[in-house]
Structures are given as C-alpha cells and as structure tokens.
Amino acid sequence: MSNQDANILLRFIRDILEQDNVPPLNTMLLSSGFRELGDNLNYLNRYIMEMEQYAGAISQGIFPEKAPDRANRFCWPLKALCSNLMHLAWQTQQIAHGDYEQHVDFLGEFSESFNIMVEQLKQREVNLKLETSRAAKKIDTLKEANDLLYSIMNNILGWVIVIGTETGEILFVNQTAKDEFKKHPEISEEVCKNLSQNTISAGKRHHNISLLVHDKSEIQKMYQVNMFHVFWKGTEANACIIYDITQQQNIKILEQDAYTDSLTGIYNRRYCMDSLERNLEGHKQFSVCFLDIDHLKFVNDCFGHLEGDQYIRLVVRALQQVFGEDDIICRIGGDEFAIISGGDDAGILEKNMEKTENALLRLSLTKKYAMSVSYGIISIGHNSTLTTEDILHKADEQMYIFKKAQYKAFASKIPPTPNHSAIQYDTITKFPVYSSFEGELANYFIEGEYLHQQDKKTAIMYLDILDFKALNEYYGYAEGDRELFEIAELLREKLDIYTGTRIFSDFFILLFSMDKKDTLEQLAKKLVRSFRIFLKDQRVYHPKCKIEIVAGLCEVEDGFNGLNQAIDNANEARKIAKASYRTECLVFNSAIKRKKNEEARLNAEIKTALANRDFSFCLQPKVSLTSGRIVGAEALVRMSENNAMIYPGEFLPLMERDGSITELDFQVYDKVCHYLYQRIREGLPVVPVSINVSRLHLRDETFADNVHSLIQSYNIKPPLIEFELTENIFFDEVVDRARHIITKLRSYGYQISIDDFGAGYSSTNLLLDLDFDVLKLDKSLVDYTIEQTRKSEVIISSLISMAKRLDIKVVCEGVETLGQLEFVKKMGCDIVQGYYFLKPVELRSFEKMLEQKGGYCPLPWDNEVVGQ
C-alpha cells in the first residue's frame, strides 16, 4: 500500500467518524488493489448516514414509512425501537380514546411508569365520570328548580320585578306584572319609578316598603313591596315581590272604623254592645262601669270644641293608665263611656275609678276648668237574664244616683248664704270662680231660695264682650281688668243676681231672678239701652277700641233639672246676638229654637257629606292685569243638599265651631291634588291653585308635614299650590304657631298668601314681620278707598308699592265693575280676582277657558284682538 492510498483511506475514515453527510469516496483515486476496500468503506459511510437520518427522524417523533435496507445492521436496533415507539403511540391513541386496558412490557422502567400513568388516568376517568354524573344531576335539579321558579314567578298572584341596583334597569318582570301593566301602564310607570328610588341600605339583605299609586280612574291603590338584594346573571340587583293590598287595607280600615271611636282611638258603642253580648252568651261573670264626663258642654262653649276634644282624650288617657289590658274601655256616646271588667268584684272597678278621679284632679291643675267624671257600677252574675240594653240602663241609673249624691254633698258643705267666706272669688269681677259657682247653683236649687220663691222666676244670662282682646293688646291688661270690673258692677246694678261667674276671659254666666209679671223681652231692651250708655261713657278710657256687649237670656223652667238646658239656650241666643256684631241682648225663643234645630239638621248633613266625601270644589280664576291671562285660581268648597246648593256661609261657621273644618279642608286638598295630577298626566295646561287654611289647623304642629305628605303622594310640584291664610289669624293666640307653619311650608317650596287683608285689624307690620309671597286686598278695602278722598288712594297705593318692593305680589279680590278694575290697575295691582272676569265656576268651565282661549281674558284697555 502506497502512502497515497493510506492517506486517502485514513482521511475518508476520519471524515466518516467526524463529519455528517460525507460524500462517497472516489475509488478511482486508489490503486486497483485497494478499490474494493474503498467500495466497502462507501457502504459503511452510506449505512452510517442512513442510520443517522433514521435515528434523527425517530428522535423527532417521525416514524418513516420506508425502513432502512435490511442489510444495514446498524439500523436493526433502531428499527426495533421505532416499532416499539409506533406501538406505544398507537396504545397512547387508544388510551386517548378511553381504552385504559393498554399495557406496556417492552420498555423497561418506562413501561412501569407508563402503566402507572395509565392506571391513574383510568381512575381519574372513573372519578370524572362520577363527578360528571353528579354535576348532571345538579344541572337537572337546577333546571327543574329554575323551571319551577319561573313557573312560580309567572303564576304567583303578586308581581315580581328585578331591578339593577346601579343602572335602575328592569332585568325581569313576571307574567302577572306584565298582564297588569298592559291594563294599567300608568301604574307601571309609577311603580317602577318608586322602586328605582328605593334601594336597600348597605349591610341589609332585604326590607319592606309600601307604595301608594293611582290608576287611570284616579283610584288610590296601595302595594306592599318585599325587596331583596340578589345577584341576577352576575349583576347586583333588587328583587321585588309586590302585592296589591288595597282591598285588605280597605277591609282593615272598615273593620277598624266599625269598632273604633275616631276621636279617641278606643272601642266604640258597637264593640261595647258586642262585648256585652259575648259575655252574656258565655255566661261569664263581669262588671260594667258607666260614666260620663262632667262639664263637657261648658268646655265646648267656653274654650271651643278642640279643647273639648282634648278634654275627652285626657279622660281616656287617665282611664288607660289606670285600667289593665284585659279591661275594655269604650266610648258609647259624646261624653259617655263604658268599662267592661272581668269578674264580679265591683270593688276593683270602684278603686280604679277613684284612681281615675285623682288623675283627673291632677290634670285639672294645668287647665282653666275642673276635670271630673260621674259613674255608676253594676256586677253581672253567671246566670244573668239581663240584656245589653238592660245593663247599660242600670249602669246609667247608678251613674245618675252618684251624680245627684255629689251635688247634694257639695251643697251640704255650703251654708245657705251666697256670701259665705268659704266661697272663692274672681279677683277682678268679684263673682265666684267657676268651682264655687257650681256649688252656689246646687245650693240655690236644692236647698236655697228657689224652693221658696212664689212670685219670682229664675233666668240665666250668658254674656260676651266683643273685641275685648284688642282692648287688652292695645291698652294693656290693667285697662282690660278695669273694664271687666265696671261691667260686673253694671250687671250687679241692673240685675237681681243670686250668683254668677266669669267662666273664661270675657265670658259671664249669671243666675238671677225677676218678678213673674215682667218679661225677659222687656228686660232685654232695658239692658241694651244700659249697655250702650255704659259703653259710650267708657269710650273715653279706650277711644281707639270699640268693644260691644252681647248677651243671651233664658228662663229656667224646670228647676235644677232644667238648668243645663237653660244655660245652653242662653248661650245659643248669645251666639245669634254676636252675629250682628253690635251691642245686643236676645231672649231664647221659638225662632232661635228653630234655627238651632236647623243647625242640628245641617250638622247631620255635614257629617254625612264628610263621611261620603260629597263635598266638591269650584275654581275662580286670578287674572294678570299685565297679560290678561289666567295665572292662578282659588279653590272654593261647595256643598249641595237634594240638588240644591248650600252656601259656604251656612255650613262653614258650623264646621269651624265643631272642628270638622279641618277634615273638610283635607278632603278639598285631596281633591285639588287629584285634579292637578290628572291634568298633568294627560298633558293638559294647569295653573297654581290656592287652597284655604282654617285657623284650627294652626293648632296642629304636624299640619305642614301632613299636607306636604298628601301633596307629594300625587307628585304635585310645590309651586302649583298656594296656601291662603286670613289676616285675622295673626291677631289670635296661634300667631306664633302660624309663623312656624308658614316658615315650614315655604321651606317646602309652597307659596303663602295673606287673604282678606284690610277686612280687620290690618297692619303694615304684617309685611315686615311675616314671610309670605302674596297679599290679597279685601274687597271692602278697595270699596272704601274708592269712596274716600285722595288721601285714601295715597295710602293704598303706598301699601301696594311697599309690598312690591318686598317682592310680594298683590291680588285684589272682589273686583266686579269696570270702575273697580281701572282703579286697582291705577293703584299698581298685579292680579285681580272677581266677578268682572268670572265667578267661581265648575271645573269643566274653567278648563274650557284654559284650553280654548289659552287662558286669555280680554282687558278693556287692550286694543289688540287675541289671535290676530
């Protein structure tokens, strides 16, 4: 072998060992003897290259379809490995398809690991199938529950509404709600608006609210809402379950009204009779106390019916503090009560009534009158044959026996002389105080002079001094006290007085006697002349205050039994005399009795009308003198009887007297709000409406909040409501409370107007002391100014100018003629109200003016024709 052949072969072998893809050896470069060796080395090189490529493909997970030549022994192990790997890949695919029975034995340690992995996968599949089965069951359960929930929500009687807490978007409405909303879309709008505004406070899962809405027929409906905080499809929401409870509430109210006394809140006569009937039917032992309130008529007449109502409520409170929960307290009449107590021990009732009397005695210290009750007690056994009416009748008899014994006991303590030192006297008038006056009455009729008078008759005088409050305020209480003493002296001079009392402020009750041959009518005429002369002489002490004396007289016809009736009749005559507003003395007669009966009949009609909500209202427009357009209206109440109109002047004074005016006012407020709500909802024009406020409301500290709540329940904006208060309210004892209520109403955004300015004690101080928005000049002030000199014109024009500078609008009411219209315009008035433009009219007539004429009322000084 030559060196050249050795080098070529050695280099080729080295390349095979060290390099990839070595090209074949050119054997022609070798000597002939070494060419076969060169060919074998080329075979070796090709087999190595083939092995490398095969191994490279296997290492990359590629299993070549064409295997290396069988002659290439280098690839035999690789072929075996490739076959095993191909089988392993197939087994893996089988496992991937869920065949966990595959087993490997040919890969040594890998086989063991592979087999463990297969067992784990097999167990995992079992577990997964179990979990899947459980999940499937849960899904089926949830689907069933979901179907059931939807079925319940869509078939439940209540509405179900789900609202997003952040967006206010409605996420779900059940079928019941959908059906209802289709019938009443206006309810849908109101309900959803209210629900969006009511959210659950932080930290709470649920709460309940009540909604008050109105359907298209203006019928008030009430809904109870149960609101829950939930997650709805990944969003925080409020789920609301809503029930219409209108009928239940109405039934509840009816049931409550049927058995409850509206004034006191305790049980009424109907409940009392039912309770007595149940006790009798159950053969139970029980006791009944029948009582009435002493002097309630006196309190009503002297202090007003509101004070009388307060007297009744205080008695009830005293009873409730003494008697237990098992005792039944019922108001069965105006001043009559019944208490039903279990067991037949009347002694317990007696002790409780003594405690009640002591409680009322303590309460009397805070009042200007004595508070007491008279009562009778009876016990009912197991087998009583009495009826309910028998029980009340017997208890009533016991009560009157008790009352008569009280009077006799009281009279026995007083010697038969009206001037006994034990009698307490009013320091101003020197008449007995009321408590002593009662004893004097008992003394006179039961054991005194009345029993021995043959040629005398006994009478009652009920007297009142008009405008006495103004005298006190203007000249001071010392002058007022002096005047009271002088009047008392005059009465003693002109009448044969046995006893008398100043029951309150400037009210007197006198018991006097006179010859039988003289008449009360003759005496009344003499008294009027004496009163007028006296007042004229007294005018020098108070020239700027003109007081008047009015009195009523009535004969006592049946001794002590007729005394209360005589006092009532004299008071009735006084009230009629007072209406003339001049010094007068009237005798109670058949005409007054007829008037009293007529008022009683009208009172019954009023109560029925209130119960049935039969009162209506009309509107009188307010017209701007600048634009000629209607800028507001006043709501005026109306009442009819048998299709005949009853004028407000007939029924309003009666309602002011007994306090029912407050209930009437709220009925009118409610109807005005209904009217405005309906107009606004239908997109029709509206103007602000003024509503009147009785002075009795000003005694109620909650009035402003109550009326605001009512108006808000209709979503009426405050600028559409104006409250009218008459100026004389501010000269009453409620003036401070009136200021407070005005301030509160204005804080809510309502307009306040002072009505009838100039009709009474008008003062420019009102403009300075009170915050209000509108000043309504009374017709009488305008009429007076027109009839007077230029001086009067300057005064009224200055008043109007002052009001305007204080940003107070001025309305002149009662404008009926062209002359009055031109005069108030000349004075600078902004707005007028009166018959010149339109009298108070029914709602439809008022609406026609707003809708057809655009609310325009032609002004006499306008040259333009509307619409051209």
Image (tube, rainbow, N blue to C red):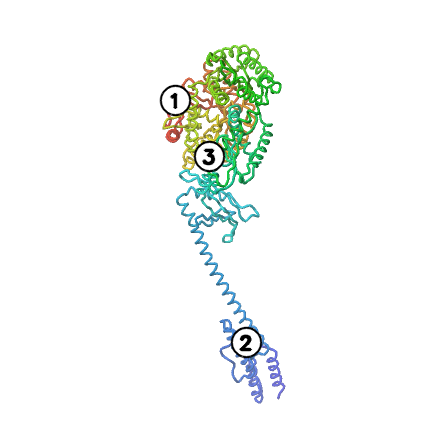
Q: Determine the CA span between mark 2 and mark 3.
A: 120 Å
Residue 170 appears at what percent x and percent y? 47, 48
Viewer-proximal residue, 46 or 194? 194
* Residue tagged 3: 390
Residue 541 appears at what percent x and percent y? 57, 12
Q: How many marks?
A: 3
Q: Determine the CA span between mark 1 and mark 3.
A: 81 Å
* Residue tagged 1: 863
Classify mark 1: helix, strand or loop.
Answer: loop
The mark nearer the N terminus, 2 or 3, is: 2
Q: Are marks 2 and 1 in contact (CB under 8 Å)?
A: no
Which amino acid, by three-letter code, is at mark 2?
A: Ile
Foreground tag (2 vs 3): 3
Viewer-proximal residue, 416 or 259? 416
Foreground tag (2 vs 1): 1
* Residue tagged 2: 58
Classify mark 3: helix, strand or loop.
Answer: helix
> At x 53% / y 85%, what residue is drawn?
71
Query: Would you identify the image quadrant in which residue 652 lies?
Result: top left
Which amino acid, by three-letter code, is at mark 1?
A: Asn
Mark carried by residue 847: none
Q: Determine the CA span between mark 2 and mark 1.
A: 113 Å
Residue 676 appears at what percent x and percent y? 43, 34
